[in-house]
Image: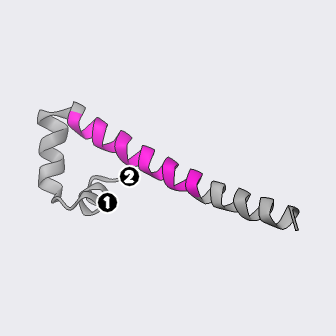
Amino acid sequence: MTQKELALLIGKNEKTIRNWKKENPELLRLIKQGLALDQTIEETEKHLENLKKIKEQASK
């Protein structure tokens, strides 16, 4: 993910992202980890919904 993409995603400007990278890289790392976790949760929810549909169809 580019700094520009990250800035758009979290509603900050690119300069802020650059400053965070320079002055507080741990904060930037945590934000990226949080976004990755969010994506994983969304994917898991989709898989769970698919499994529920399969279970419903199998029980008919």
Among all residues in the image, which is located at the extreme front?
A: 60
Is residue 39 inside the magenta stretch?
Answer: yes
Q: Label 1: which residue?
A: 5
Q: How many marks?
A: 2
Q: Which mark is residue 56?
A: none
- Horizontally, residue 16 falls left or right of residue 44, namely left
Q: Secondary structure at mark 2?
A: loop
Whole-percent x and y of residue 43?
A: 56, 54
Whole-percent x and y of residue 7?
A: 23, 58
Q: Residues within 10 Å of mark 1 (few under 14, many from 20)?
A: few
Identity of the residue drawn at 50% across and 55% down: 42
Residues at circles 1 and 2 in contact by the CB criterion of under 8 Å:
yes
Dividing the picture into quarters, in which one does residue 52 lie?
A: bottom right
Q: Which residues are magenta?
A: 27-45
Identity of the residue drawn at 35% across and 43% down: 34
Give the residue type at disc 1.
Glu
Whole-percent x and y of residue 28?
A: 24, 40
Q: Residues within 10 Å of mark 2 (few under 14, many from 20)?
A: few
> Mostly what secondary structure, the magenta segment?
helix
Is residue 5 inside the magenta stretch?
Answer: no
Q: Nearer the viewer, residue 35 or 20?
A: 35
Give the residue type at disc 2.
Met
Q: Secondary structure at mark 1?
A: helix
